[in-house]
Every structure is written in structure tokens, then in C-alpha cells.
Image (cartoon, helix red, strand yellow):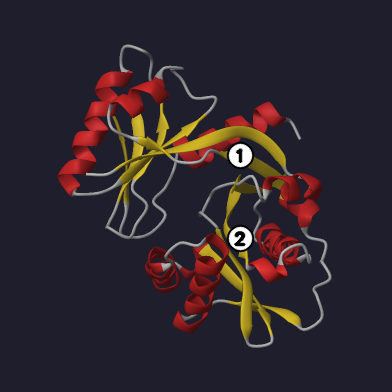
Amino acid sequence: MDQHEVLNRFDRHMRRDATPDNSAAVVEHTGGVVRQSGGPHDWNGVLWSDLDEESAPAAVAAQVAHFTALGREFEWKHYSHDRPATLPALLLAAGFVAEPAEALMVGEAAALTAPVELPEGVRLVPVTDAAGVELMASVHEQAFGSDGGWLRQRLLAQLTGTPDEVVAVVAMAGDVPVSAARMDLPPGKEFAGLWGGGTTEAWRGKGVYRALVAYRARIAAARGYPYLQVDASDDSRPILHRLGFVQLSITTPYVHKP
């Protein structure tokens, strides 16, 4: 993989030329930034910026004013290769709070499709309706210790409004959900996004997470996506590295609440 070229492709496809991730959201190019604005359960934030030390302060202030007027919490999704170097300090000074950094990791979909043997009694079930979404939210709450309400709202909206652009799957041990993940398939892009891969504590280290990656890789490759993209936590980063993913940057969510 030519890492420099793939990073340039990622910036162009997924950030600079981003498209709305659902039918209710709007992507705008304004004041040197690319932002998405949507409803209270949508992702609201800045995807890309082309700023320098002179233009950055006004751009930050303009985005705070825009989302505050909407009454929206929003995220400035910063990458370690973004410029200017002073941007993180400007965001903090404007009232943003930095959440834990994650690694931008990319893998070639076709190289990640090999099936993984699941533990005895575990099966992968596609999520297509509200009942499946509830199983996913249950896993999310157990694996990450956070409320799954936003996931219920977002995934139900995707499955209803743009079902061809999302894949969701839950691993079941008998009747108990033990792991779950989803994948965004943005039309016309080269990168399928892997999100929300979480496994309940008792089932970690048994290959279930790897099986969910392979499951989604097969679908992405069949749909013509050459790359898989993950914002990897410290827990998932070594697993993805062993599977063949490459780290291209570090991304930090800077969150501003109205």
C-alpha cells in the first residue's frame, strides 16, 4: 500500500468531497471548511478544513456560531496531518473538549475476506429491523459502558432511509448477543467505514471481533470498495494491525456543546 497516496485518497473522498451520511443531513463547503449539519440524532460537525494561521480563528468562530444557532452539539474531527499546527489550541480556547484520540487505520478489503472460525455455538446474524437494532444497542451498552440511545435512532434511520448504504451484524451465542458492528457504504467512494465493533467482556479474545471484520470485508469487496477505514481505539488497534491494517494518521474528536 502506498500510504501517502491512500491518505490523499481518503482526505479527498471522505473529507473534502464528503456526502451526507443520511437523507436528513446537509454537507456544506463554507469558509475553508466542509461541515455536516443534521438533526439532533445525526452526526454534526466539521469533516475537513483548509486553513492557515490567519484564517483559522475566524473559521473556528464561524462554526461555533453556526452550530450554536442550530442548538447542536458538534464535533471538529481533527487529524494529526491537518494544518495549521495551532488548530488544536484554537479549538480548546474556543471551548471545545478533546475526546480520546484514535488511529485512522486502512486495510485493503480484498485481503481481509478470509473466513474466521467462530467459537462453538456462535453465529453471525444480519441486522435489518428494529429487533436487530435493539440487540446491537444491548451489546454497545455492555461493551462500551455507554447509552445506546443514539445508536438506536441513527441505525434505524439508516435502515429505513438508506438501507443500501449500511450493513449491520450481531454475533449471537444462542439467544444472547455477544458482539456487534456496522459498516457505512457511501455511494461513489473508495472507503467503506467500519464502526462500532464491540464485544462483551466474556467473549473477548475468542476471534469474534476478527470474524465481524471479515464479514464486512467480504460485503465491501463484493460491492466494489477497495479499502476499509477504521477509527481504532487502543483496544482494537493491535488486532487490526495483525489483520493487515495500516495506520495513516491520528484523529481526535474536539466536541463543542451549545
Pointers 1 and 2 in contact (C-beta within 8 Å): no
Which residue is painted at 27% across and 58% down in the image? 40
Q: Is residue 15 above or below residue 83?
A: below
Residue 179 rendering spot, x and y as whole percentages: 63, 70
Query: Residue 214's x, y, as percent?
Result: 74, 62
Residue 103 marker: 1
> Which mark, by number, is residue 197?
2
Quadrant housing the N terminus: top right
The answer, for residue 32, to whether it is visible in the render is: no
Foreground pick, 189 / 122: 122
Q: Quadrant of residue 124?
A: bottom right
In depth, the one of 153 and 238 nearer the eye is: 238
Residue 171 pos. (x, y %)? 66, 75
| Secondary structure at numbered mark 2 | strand
Q: Residue drawn at (75%, 61%), measured in percent from left and top? A: 210
Residue 1 appears left or right of 182: right
Q: Residues within 10 Å of mark 1 (few under 14, many from 20)?
A: many
| Image position of 105 with respect to 83: above or below | below
Q: Nearer the viewer, residue 107 or 41?
A: 41
Question: For the view shown, which residue lies furthest in the left direction?
Answer: 69
Q: Residue at x 53, y 38 (%)?
A: 101
The quadrant of the image that shows the C terminus is: top left
Name above or below for residue 120 compared with residue 18.
below
Give the image quarter of residue 10: top right
Residue 20 shows up from this direction: yes
Q: Amino acid at mark 1?
A: Ala
Q: Quick one: label 1 or label 2, which is nearer the N terminus?
A: 1
SS at badge 1: strand
* Separation of residues labelled 1 and 2 (CA atoms): 15 Å
Residue 7 percent coordinates (x, y): 61, 32
Looking at the rendered structure, the kind of residue marked 2 is Gly
